[in-house]
Amino acid sequence: MSYGYEDIDKIVDFKTWKTKKKIDELFRIDSYMYTNLGTDSTKAEKEKVKRKSKAIYKAISKINPKLAKELIYHMDE
Protein backbone atom coordinates (compact mmCIF):
# COMPACT_ATOMS: atom_id res chain seq x y z
CA MET A 1 0.00 0.00 0.00
CA SER A 2 1.20 3.49 -0.80
CA TYR A 3 0.75 6.20 1.80
CA GLY A 4 0.57 9.95 1.28
CA TYR A 5 0.69 13.15 3.27
CA GLU A 6 -2.89 12.71 4.50
CA ASP A 7 -1.85 9.43 6.17
CA ILE A 8 0.86 10.77 8.49
CA ASP A 9 -1.23 10.50 11.67
CA LYS A 10 -2.27 6.98 10.73
CA ILE A 11 1.37 5.98 10.21
CA VAL A 12 2.41 7.40 13.58
CA ASP A 13 -0.35 5.43 15.30
CA PHE A 14 0.43 2.05 13.70
CA LYS A 15 1.02 -0.47 16.49
CA THR A 16 2.49 -3.23 14.32
CA TRP A 17 5.19 -1.08 12.69
CA LYS A 18 8.58 -0.59 14.29
CA THR A 19 9.85 2.95 14.87
CA LYS A 20 12.32 2.75 11.99
CA LYS A 21 9.64 1.71 9.50
CA LYS A 22 7.37 4.58 10.57
CA ILE A 23 10.14 7.16 10.20
CA ASP A 24 11.28 5.69 6.88
CA GLU A 25 7.75 5.91 5.49
CA LEU A 26 7.36 9.51 6.69
CA PHE A 27 10.68 10.40 5.04
CA ARG A 28 9.54 8.67 1.84
CA ILE A 29 6.41 10.83 1.79
CA ASP A 30 8.50 13.94 2.44
CA SER A 31 11.01 13.16 -0.31
CA TYR A 32 8.19 12.34 -2.76
CA MET A 33 6.71 15.81 -2.25
CA TYR A 34 10.06 17.51 -2.89
CA THR A 35 10.90 15.41 -5.93
CA ASN A 36 7.61 16.44 -7.52
CA LEU A 37 8.62 20.09 -7.36
CA GLY A 38 10.21 21.34 -10.54
CA THR A 39 11.83 24.43 -11.93
CA ASP A 40 8.38 25.55 -13.03
CA SER A 41 6.88 25.25 -9.52
CA THR A 42 5.53 28.48 -8.10
CA LYS A 43 6.70 30.01 -4.86
CA ALA A 44 3.30 29.16 -3.34
CA GLU A 45 3.70 25.49 -4.30
CA LYS A 46 7.18 25.40 -2.76
CA GLU A 47 5.91 27.00 0.46
CA LYS A 48 3.04 24.51 0.62
CA VAL A 49 5.49 21.61 0.40
CA LYS A 50 7.66 23.20 3.09
CA ARG A 51 4.63 23.52 5.42
CA LYS A 52 3.68 19.91 4.79
CA SER A 53 7.27 18.85 5.40
CA LYS A 54 7.27 20.65 8.74
CA ALA A 55 4.03 18.84 9.66
CA ILE A 56 5.73 15.54 8.85
CA TYR A 57 8.67 16.46 11.08
CA LYS A 58 6.25 17.32 13.88
CA ALA A 59 4.66 13.88 13.41
CA ILE A 60 8.15 12.38 13.67
CA SER A 61 8.51 14.19 17.00
CA LYS A 62 5.85 11.86 18.41
CA ILE A 63 8.12 8.93 17.52
CA ASN A 64 11.61 10.37 17.98
CA PRO A 65 11.63 13.87 19.54
CA LYS A 66 15.41 14.35 19.28
CA LEU A 67 15.50 13.60 15.55
CA ALA A 68 12.52 15.83 14.86
CA LYS A 69 14.04 18.71 16.82
CA GLU A 70 17.18 18.53 14.68
CA LEU A 71 15.17 18.35 11.44
CA ILE A 72 13.03 21.35 12.32
CA TYR A 73 16.08 23.30 13.48
CA HIS A 74 17.86 22.77 10.15
CA MET A 75 14.72 23.51 8.18
CA ASP A 76 14.37 26.90 9.88
CA GLU A 77 18.05 27.77 9.50
Image (cartoon, grey):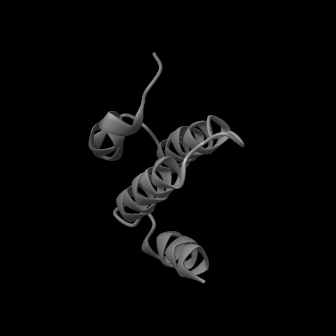
Where 1 sits versus 51, above or below? above
- The residue at the far top in this view is 1
Quarter of the N terminus within the rendering: top left
Q: Count numbered badges in the picture.
A: 0
At which x and y percent is residue 70?
Answer: 57, 78
At which x and y percent is residue 16?
Answer: 36, 34
In depth, the one of 24 and 44 nearer the eye is 44
Where 59 sits versus 31, above or below? below
Residue at horizontal 43%, vertical 62%? 54
In depth, the one of 45 and 76 nearer the eye is 45
Quarter of the C terminus within the rendering: bottom right
At which x and y percent is residue 28?
Answer: 59, 39
Task: Judge from the rendering whether residue 26 lies leftward or rightward of residue 61; answer left or right.
Answer: right
Task: Judge from the rendering whether residue 70 lies leftward or rightward of residue 6; answer left or right.
Answer: right
In depth, the one of 42 and 34 nearer the eye is 42
At which x and y percent is residue 71?
Answer: 56, 71
